[in-house]
Image: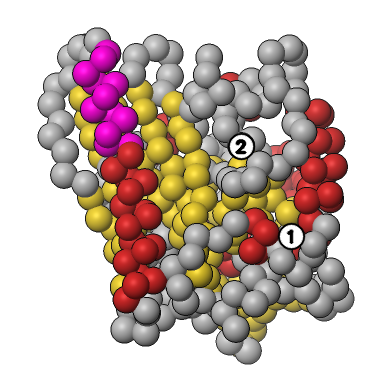
């Protein structure tokens, strides 16, 4: 198996599962198991403030993660929430990022526009659905500040870049033997440098065109049938859209027969000022020793997850290391099968800016000066 083999992470990536959602009360979700309720209801209530106003709803803490009730997002923050009873799937948010939360009898599973990363989770507690504060910060345009002493989380709207982000689709003919669903984001804005806008849009479109070209090549060389048609598609999510910086997650999927499809995840982080595609060194410029820390820590983490023989040993970050940025920090991404078996999924590791930068240091130092 090639080190670039990719994994189909979840049936939730299929776009069709989200069609036809209708609004129902968030309390529709069944209560969690008795064991889960006992584990979570012992946590003290977390006060939630929105634009300086204390909300009637309370948050909870689960294993150190501050969780916000989805009902509060709908009722107090005005974030759209809908529910599809057929697929037991909630849709939270609007615009270029939407959370899709699929409920089971005892837990819930989250993706953003079909992309599920290791930092995403959800909980059902006493019949209510909760999502972590980090998802609000990273994907729903909500700033969140946690005050441990007062057990209070303060929410407010993020100051996002003044740009418009639209989804475009590459034209491609599907038939009974192959399906193409390939899209990509394009940005626009009156305050953008036209050359920078074009450079960013060209890079994102080129990524999508690469998927289509690879799909057509595989079709020409493969043996697709109507019984086992090939599939090529992708999803994208905006991970960071502040301070003149845009970070995009592109996730590509292909199925060419066999037991499962293959998924690849690629991060693109741009400076809106000049359209430059940023490297990890640009993000962490305030810490000239970031490689030493990351190389040592990643080696420990990767050595710990490896099971059996046949996987590469981590040595050091690549010169063009794959990563993306969220408000939570930097996520380092590797390919499937590089360091772990298929069942593990895409290896990725998130580090907060506090871990990576000196006290008082800021990410993207000097990029917009």
Q: Residue at x 47, y 77 (%)?
A: 273
Question: Which of the marked residues, 1 or 2, is nearer the chain's N terminus?
Answer: 2
Q: Residue at x 34, y 14 (%)?
A: 257
Q: Position of residue 168 (x, y in %)?
A: 25, 55
Q: Residue at x 32, y 76 (%)?
A: 194
Q: Position of residue 139 (x, y in %)?
A: 51, 62
Question: Which residue in the protein does label 2 denote?
Answer: 334
Question: Which residue in the protein does label 1 denote?
Answer: 352
Which of discs 1 and 2 lies nearer the camera? The answer is 2
Report the side of 231 relative to 268 (left or right). Answer: left
Q: Residue at x 49, y 32 (%)?
A: 9
Q: How many marks?
A: 2
Q: Say which quarter of the image contains residue 316.
A: top right
| Magenta-drawn stretch, dominant element (helix, strand or loop) | helix
Q: Position of residue 147 (x, y in %)?
A: 79, 76
Report the side of 261 relative to 107 (left or right). Answer: left
Over which residues does the magenta segment extend?
211-222
Q: State the CA–CA distance, disc 1 to disc 2.
A: 18 Å
User: Between 296 and 289, which is closer to the camera in this rendering?
Assistant: 289
Report the side of 58 relative to 204 (left or right). Answer: right
Numbered disc 1: secondary structure: loop
- Can residue 81 be seen at all in this image of the molecule? no
Taking the magenta stretch, the answer to whether it contains residue 214 is yes
User: Between 220 and 297, which is closer to the camera in this rendering?
Assistant: 220
Q: How is the image coloured?
A: secondary structure
Q: Residues within 10 Å of mark 1 (few under 14, many from 20)?
A: some
Q: Say which quarter of the image contains residue 108.
A: top right
Taking the magenta stretch, the answer to whether it contains residue 128 is no
User: Between 22 and 12, which is closer to the camera in this rendering?
Assistant: 12
């Amino acid at each position: 198996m090639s080190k670039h083999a990719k994994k189909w992470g979840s049936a939730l990536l299929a776009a069709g599962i989200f069609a036809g959602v209708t609004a129902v009360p968030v309390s529709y979700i069944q209560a969690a198991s008795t064991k889960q309720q006992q584990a979570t209801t012992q946590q003290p209530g977390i006060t939630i403030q929105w634009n300086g106003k204390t909300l009637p709803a309370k948050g909870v803490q689960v294993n150190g993660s501050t969780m916000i009730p989805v009902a509060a997002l709908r009722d107090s923050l005005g974030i759209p929430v809908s529910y599809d009873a057929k697929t037991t799937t909630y849709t939270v948010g609007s615009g270029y990022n939407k959370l899709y939360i699929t409920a089971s009898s005892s837990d819930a599973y989250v993706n953003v526009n079909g992309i599920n990363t290791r930092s995403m989770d959800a909980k059902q507690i006493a019949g209510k659905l909760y999502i972590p504060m980090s998802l609000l910060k990273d994907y729903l345009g909500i700033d969140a500040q946690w005050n441990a002493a007062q057990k209070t989380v303060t929410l407010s709207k993020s100051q996002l870049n003044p740009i418009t982000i639209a989804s475009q689709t590459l034209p491609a003919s599907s038939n009974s033997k192959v399906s193409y669903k390939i899209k990509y984001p394009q940005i626009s804005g009156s305050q953008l440098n036209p050359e920078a806008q074009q450079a960013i849009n060209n890079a994102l479109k080129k990524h999508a065109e690469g998927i289509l070209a690879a799909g057509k090549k595989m079709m020409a060389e493969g043996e697709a049938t109507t019984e086992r048609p090939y599939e090529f598609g992708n999803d994208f999510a905006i991970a960071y859209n502040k301070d003149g910086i845009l970070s995009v997650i592109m996730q590509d999927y292909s199925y060419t027969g066999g037991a499962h499809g293959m998924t690849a995840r690629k991060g693109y982080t741009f400076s809106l000022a000049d359209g430059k595609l940023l490297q990890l060194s640009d993000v962490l410029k305030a810490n000239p020793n970031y490689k030493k820390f990351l190389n040592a820590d990643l080696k420990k983490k990767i050595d710990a997850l490896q099971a059996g023989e046949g996987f590469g040993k981590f040595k050091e970050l690549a010169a063009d290391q794959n990563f993306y940025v969220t408000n939570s920090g930097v996520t380092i991404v590797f390919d499937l099968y590089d360091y772990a078996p298929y069942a593990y999924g895409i290896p990725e590791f998130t580090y907060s800016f506090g871990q990576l930068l000196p006290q008082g240091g800021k990410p993207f130092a000097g990029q917009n000066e």
